[in-house]
Image: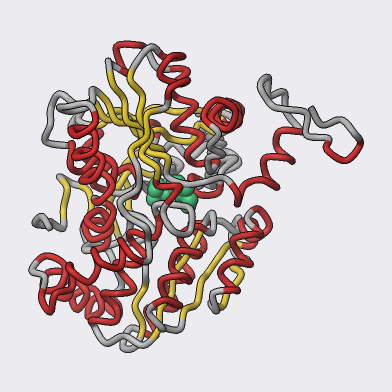
Amino acid sequence: MSSDTSKFGEYGGQYVPEALMPAIEELDDAYRRYVLENEDGFVDEFRERLRDFGGRPTPLQRADRLSERYDTDLFLKREDLLHGGAHKLNNALGQVLLAKYMGKERIVAETGAGQHGTATAMAAAHLDVPCEIYMGERDINRQRPNVFRMRLNGAAVNPVTTGRGTLKEAISETMRDWATTVETTHYVIGSVVGPHPFPTMVREFQSVISEEARRQFDDQVGGLPDSVVACAGGGSNTMGAFSRFVSDESVDLYAVEAGGSSLAVDEEEGVAPNSASLSTGTEGVLHGARTKLLQDRDGQIVESHSVSSGLDYAGVGPELAYLVDEGRVTPVTVDDDAALEGFHRLSQTEGIIPALETAHAVAWLEQATSEQLGDSVVVCVSGRGDKDLESVIEETASREIPNAPDMDVFSGGMR
Ligand SMILES: Cc1ncc(COP(=O)(O)O)c(C=O)c1O
């Protein structure tokens, strides 16, 4: 695996309380030895478990109807087919295994959409480690099937009632737990966020996505795609899908953020009706790292919004913020309505029901110019949409989504 760094330009770092520093240093040391140097065969075991438990490699599938629609060769990297239904398992399995190598006896994790919590609960059951998940109350209500899945795998789910009850508060609460239990506990963070080494380590565990996609594209088509598209919440599927293409200057990289209902920040109310920190955020510190954030003039983090819980976060990974400033990654936004249209479009055209997060990446294809897409595109299908069905029924009913089917299945209205 590749080398690491604690800073990406001005971004990243380790802005944590003194009490957490020993744990961060211990983790950094373990990351270097086991992940970078393959001590005790860690990387070999990780790869083997990703294959046998996770089902890797996931396919790179040509999407025929979307290729025709956008007049390009369009490929889907099918992370929705990974065990658990999203890319999150790549990281969760890596970190839970690392915790075992470090001799930790307990796992804590936060979750937003519940996909990371589910992946962590699965990995913890698989590797026989007790596991507790913190989840905002609002997200618990939005993602009930995943809450049940976590419980089925034996994890405790602790509701977080502070703030808006979404991902930001869940991360804060998990960090609080970890600060008092570091001796015995590992915090499995769910994205490329947090203090170093988390952003680098999570990116390395997720890089299997671009490592495979690069090889598969070369085998199936030859050469490299013109562009790679992935949705960005914290940025783990984005970094996973981009990282092995970053040094290929000919490949354009598009990070699709949640535009929510508007791109403006309401300073008075302290809310941003979006989660577009790469496109509209400013520099600040959140959850142990300097990065781009949604904040007001006084540096207070404002509440974010997205129709998809997994993108509903006021920050983003520091490496992604850096790559945007460097001009290597282009951030773009898709609003809630367009994301729902994207959800229905992929379901209808390719027979794949995507996660609402993924639907943002799919929806952006509709807004992109043919120059942006180029002759060939890889879109990361970060997850499947089963967890979102209740939300989609509700959200579709309350909006005008032109391509939505009639959802009234119970009064004979189903077409
Ligand atoms: C399917 C899916 N895609 C994307 C995301 C966004 O997270 P990240 O930006 O870390 O990939 C989530 C988060 O829960 C998710 O469940």
Q: Position of residue 265 (x, y in %)?
A: 51, 34
Which part of the image, by quadrant, shows the C terminus?
A: top right
Q: Position of residue 212 (x, y in %)?
A: 24, 45
Which part of the image, by quadrant, shows the N terminus?
A: bottom left
- Colour pattern: secondary structure
Q: Nearer the viewer, residue 68 or 231?
A: 68
Q: Is residue 19 above or below residue 139?
A: below
Is residue 25 visible to us here? yes
Q: Is residue 97 above or below residue 235?
A: below
Horizontal side of 412 relative to 344 (left or right) equals: right
For image coordinates 54% across by 54% down, the residue present is: 113
Total count of labels: 0
Among the 4 quarters of the image, the one containing residue 238: top left
Among the 4 quarters of the image, the one containing residue 37: bottom left
Among the 4 quarters of the image, the one containing residue 2: bottom left
For image coordinates 17% across by 75% down, the residue present is: 30
For image coordinates 39% across by 60% down, the residue present is: 89
Q: Nearer the viewer, residue 55 or 336?
A: 55
Q: Is residue 410 above or below residue 148?
A: above
Is residue 299 visible to us here? no
For image coordinates 28% across by 58% down, the residue present is: 202
Q: Position of residue 26 (x, y in %)?
A: 19, 78
Q: Residue most toward the right?
A: 411
Q: Is residue 389 above or below residue 411?
A: below
Horizontal side of 318 relative to 118 (left or right) equals: left
